[in-house]
Image (cartoon, helix red, strand yellow):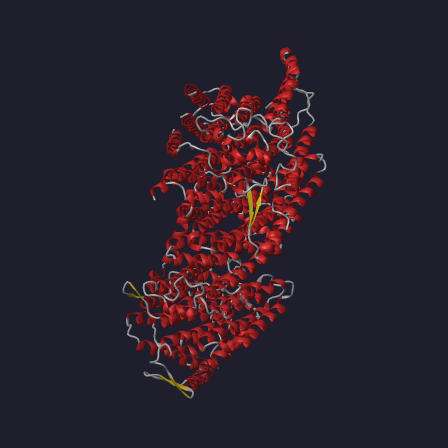
Amino acid sequence: MIAQIAMATGFALILIGLYGALTNHNLLRMIVAFTIADTGVNIVIVAVGYMAGRTAPILDAAVPAAEAAQRIIDPVPQALVLTAIVIGLGITALMLAYAYKLYQKKRTLDIGKLTELKW
Amino acid sequence: MLAMTLLLCVAMIGAALVAIRTDGLPVSILAAGLLSLLASVVFLVLASPDVAMTEAAIGSGLTTFLFFFVLGRVRSGEREGGEHD
Amino acid sequence: MIRRAVVLALVLAMGAIFATLLAGYAPDGDLNLTARYYADRTAPDIGSANIVTAIIVTYRGLDTLGEVTVLFLSATIVGLVLAGGRRRETAQRPPVPVGELLTTGSRFLVPLIMLLGVYVFVNGHLTPGGGFQGGAVVASGVLLMLLADPLKHFSHRLIAAVESVAGFAYVVIGVLGLVLAGGFLDNRILPLGELGALASAGAIPLIYSLVGLKVGAEFSSMLASLSETEEL
Amino acid sequence: MVSAIFILAAALAAAFLLGLLKDEQRGVAYAITLLALAFMTWISADWTWAFAMDGAASVDIFTAGTEPPFAINLRVGLAEAVLTLIISLTALLSALAMKDALLALGRRAMAVLLVATLAFCGIVLTRDIFNLFVFFELAAISTGGLILLSDDERALAAGFKYLIVSQVISILLLIGIIFAYHATGTLNIDGMADAAQSILPGSRQAFMLAFFLMFMALVAELKPFPANGWALDIYESAHPAYSAIFSAAGGAAALYAVDKLLLVGGTAWLPAATGIGVVTFVGANLLALPQTNDRRLLGYSSVAQIGLILTVLGQRDVLGDLTGFVALGLLLAHSVAKAGLYWLSSLVAGRELSAWAALRGHPLMIFAFATFLCLLVGLPPFPGFYAKWELARVLAAEGRIALLALILFGALIEATYLFRWFGYTIKRDKPAEDIACASGNVIAICVAAVTGWVLGYLWGDAANVMLGRGNLLLALPLLFALAFLLLEWLPAWTKNMLAIAGLVGYFALTWGDYDPLRLIFFVIFLIGGAVILLASFHAHGRRVGFYPAAMLMYAGMTMLIEATDTFGFFAAWEILTVGSYFLILRGKHSEPHALSYLVFSLGGAFLILAGFALAASGAPLGVSPRLTFALSELAQVAQPLAPWVFLLLAIGFMTKTAAIGLHIWLPGAHAEAETDVSPMVSGILLKAGLFGLFILLMSMGKQQLYGIELTYVMLWIGAITALLGNLMAIFQEDAKRLLAYSSIGQMGYALFGLALMNHLGWLMALMFVINHYIYKSMLFLSVGGVAKRTGTRAMYQMGGLIALMPLSFIAVLIGIIAMSGVPPLSGFGGRWIFYNAILESEYRLPMVVIFLSGPIAFLYLFRLIHTIFLGQLKDEHRKLKEAPFWIVLPQMIYVVLLLAFAVVPGIALRRVDEYMNQFFPTGGLNWSGLNISSPYGYWDPIAIMIIVGCIFMTLFLWLLFVNRKAQKVKQFNIVFAAERPYRPETTHFAWNFFAPYRKALGFLVQPFVTQFWGAITDTLHTGADIARRFYTGNGQTYAIHLLGFVVAVYLFARGI
């Protein structure tokens, strides 16, 4: 049940993030919205891997290697999310640098004004 | 556990809506940071500590800071481009 | 206004797709094919207590190599983008009055944060956490130093050197894996040691420490190049 | 062989190494970058060689020492090796091309370039879906970084738009991946494909949805039509060398990723891929029409080409193992051509299309430019041609005619705007600043051009081995034509000698093995061509570009005769079209006309391609669509298809003979061409169309479509063409245009003869082929000579040249007598056979129209000779000399030929007459000695010649006798000359010579057809101009377009 709730929240975050990104004209607000969407995606991915009544995939005293297969949840989504978060940060940092440079050159943060390239 | 997850999820959606709808950019960035923090707690509830740590360190920590840093650099930009049509 | 309506409609349509996905989702009763293999084979083959770390560093090592390259790329491009701006001379920047609490606090906290960061990425294969988390903590330490003393000039040469050496070493280990052990990025080039010990799981601790150093260096170079941009 | 993993490892190691260098050591950094790229190119070349030559099986490379489903594996097969080769070679050459930009930005930019190449190679090699996501992200970020290389201010905004869109793409892809993993239990593409088959129905729907999201994300990477505004902005503003990588390497990698993903989705998703691909191909090409910026135009073309290849991938279920041959052929042609064009654009300073005229000073660059355009459009010797042929054949066999029509329509539009651009380059005035000949760029361009030709050879060889097609580049005539490219440095007369020797020699070698009908065409094409080439001796200097084009045309025509199967025929048809286009383009003001010629010819050629494909599909013989389809088998095409095949082929051939409605290209093309090109194009090229019609009618005979007799329709078209062609010729002021319109009329006659479908009708048509060649070439040469001397072609500015240019006068006189069908000369023979043919056939009404056009033909002939040679001599023409010797010589040869042919028509027609018996046994002529008789009449050419000769001589002598006392009136003796000198041309008698006829029949020559075709092109243009406003330039709007695209495809997919 927890997985479904978390997944629903994740999807909601993605939708809110997309809506925010596609309606706000300010570059920084768009980037914030995209970060929210990314977080939503991460939550969905982890929620897919969750199995009720099981514990984290760390082999230690509490979870010996022998009975790991019955006790731990699916480790693969976690590995994917870890990569996704770092990649999300990479792209966000790049977008922020672009936003800063665009502001430096054009003195505006409004996406509507950056339309020299068209048609 | 169920109640806590529900609470966290509602808080997260609230934080997200605040981040999108609020006028002030700093408030929006802070709301996004809060959202990341709540997300890392949800990750803990979903039994994935690695991801929780990453989300906490990178998601709420560094991303929020990057935003504030760039915001600081373009402070005057906020008054110009911030209005909603 | 039509724009917002269109966006709302599209987002709701996407919502419908996600809803059908959500409705169709049924959590697995038991671990699927891949997860079961990892659960059973990690301890004997890789010898790492933290299965997620085993997956990240060895089984899906290419992903991590790609990921580290992503960070390297972002740091490089942020440096490229911001280097274009006028390099402001440190002298003419007005001395920002830094609070007493911040300077003494940072002088006390920074070593602790660095220690925590190193601990996290050295014990990557045992406890949750690893290269990326440790690197981020180290970066936050650097960040604190930056906040405490904005005029402090970080030598880009040093950061770039650390970053490059770590990256290059990572690739060399990958190639060693190909030459010595089963395949590219295979961690069995070093003895597996026994489960739970610090020096176990072959090359994973070494790789993850390199990743930690590299990530820490990249974040700090990103922060440094950001801090050197001038006020607009 | 070095393991392919080192491609990735080497790039990464080099990128990290660059970090260690100091900022000043940029030279060293650049050297390391080139070294790394060269090493990657060498590895992939090594693998390509191993797979292509030794046919090794594809190799899997495991990482982390564990079997694939549990670890990431890379696979290297022939396709992967070729793609990584293209990617790393493009990157290496682009690094050379943007040397200064890289050095300016320092080692960071080089590291980003290395990582970009690594990312594209990774996309091709990896077999793990999440790894694919990581490499796509790497590609996105490195693209964001490399855009900064550009010195264009707007590149920043383009980069930001790209990052916005890539964020949306990554969201879709991640959700798709995780739910696909949940449904199948593995992240490995092959594992997922197997698991997808055995999915239990419960989670089948979820898996399909997950696959949909992944598929849409990857398709969005391919810049599908409605949602690709961001890509066009990058292409326009990024550094051209990087656009080359982005288009060639990025496109190739993303396409291969989609191909891998389609393995997972199974055949259910192929229609979706085809639909998106075709919409992209046609839409992007349409919107490219109004473009003026060269890089943005290349962006549109690149998006369109990728759409076409996606369509081919979408047809994998039908193409089977041909998919690789077709898809790779198109992909490699696209990559090499697009990279080459972008490198060329980095040489040119101006961004408008006409700014490329600066290339004119460098013949090598023009050659490269032409090679890249032919590669893109898929003209004969290049891989695109083989690929398009196989695609058309298979699509027709599977009955997907609408798809084939759309693809051919898109290809036609693409050819239009590309060759319009080429026309600007050749004809528009050169901008002030010359091109910046940086060595790096030039090397890259030359390598690309050479690769294009090598690919042409390889694909020809592959087609030969796999499908039994002839390798075009080994065809002797084509090789001979291409050899002239290497002899450009020779003076014109030596090349002319070589050309004539080649033509005559080839004729001597191979004339033996042809039936009489083909032999006549063969004589006209080769010997006729050689005679016209005599006129080319008048030119001085090197005449760069003339001989390759001319010999290409002649090569095409000889291969047309030699062709036995439809592929050879179609290849020859396109070669002669391309050769004649480059030939016509040489004229001073010929650019718009050459373009309309090319568009009509290629349109006709694509109809012929569709016709042959349909014919091959319907053939009752083989179960599977026949690989090679002989021309003679056209007769066995099954009934429901036969009329359609006939219709398509007939229209295709009639575009070449300029039947009414498809004729508007001819006047401009023939009139504006050079002096010695006009006779070639008008005298010889039109016969290629007639030859096609002969082949068609010989094999398919009469066809019925919905009860209408198609040959009857052709009869009417022939009649109307003859009437209107001659009518329009009357009112022309320009001598060459008059002759051009008269060609339309004459071709109408020939078409009419052919459509009569009886023995004498065909014989008359053949007679016309010979006659028309002789007198039209002669007239064009003489008018050309006159125009060269007087400097003008307008007849009202000439007059009284009989005294100064007697030989030209004689040539025109003989030509007119022959053409009008007046007794002594061979024209009369043609008319005589024609009337016999008409008496035999039962059609009455079209005959009236043809009879009407006879006297009208005489009117414009009279106007021609009267206005040029008779009347009063203009003051400025006093000191004119006779036309140059080399232009007059062929005319005299033709005069002799006409007289000989008039006296002894048997030499050409007798054996053809017997040959015709196998088609129409009854109604032939019987040749007894030197005179000919038919059921209706009797024709003794020698008697006629003698009688008319005597009458003429007696009259002539009598006239001389009477006139010897006549008073000679000086030109300015106003009272008698009745002509005011130096008044504006309106009072000159030649101006509006047939004014009363214009009043009477003027309504018949209203330019309806021109308006019709003009209206079509205008609607396409304005439609495209309005549609491209769709790209507002706002990055957010582009993201909304993408989301809208995803939802639209979802609704559509859910609908089917």
Q: Quadrant of the C terminus of chain D?
A: top left
Residue B66, image x and y in percent? 57, 24
Q: Residue at x 49, y 49 (%)?
A: D305
Query: Seen in the image, is C2 located left or right of residue D446?
Result: left
As drawn, the residue found furthest toward the front would be A66
Query: Seen in the image, is D219 located left or right of residue D99?
Result: left
Q: Quadrant of residue D107?
A: top right
Query: Seen in the image, is D826 located left or right of residue A107?
Result: left
Query: Seen in the image, is D238 located left or right of residue C108?
Result: left
Question: Does any portion of residue D804 appear in the rendered image?
Answer: no
Residue D1049, image x and y in percent? 39, 41
As drawn, the residue found furthest toward the bottom would be D929
How many numbered marks appear?
0
In the image, D857 versus D288, the foreground residue is D288
Question: Does any portion of residue C180 appear in the rendered image?
Answer: yes
Q: As displayed, is residue C50 above or below residue D593? A: above
Residue D561, image x and y in percent? 48, 70
Q: As displayed, is residue D990 above or below residue C58? A: below
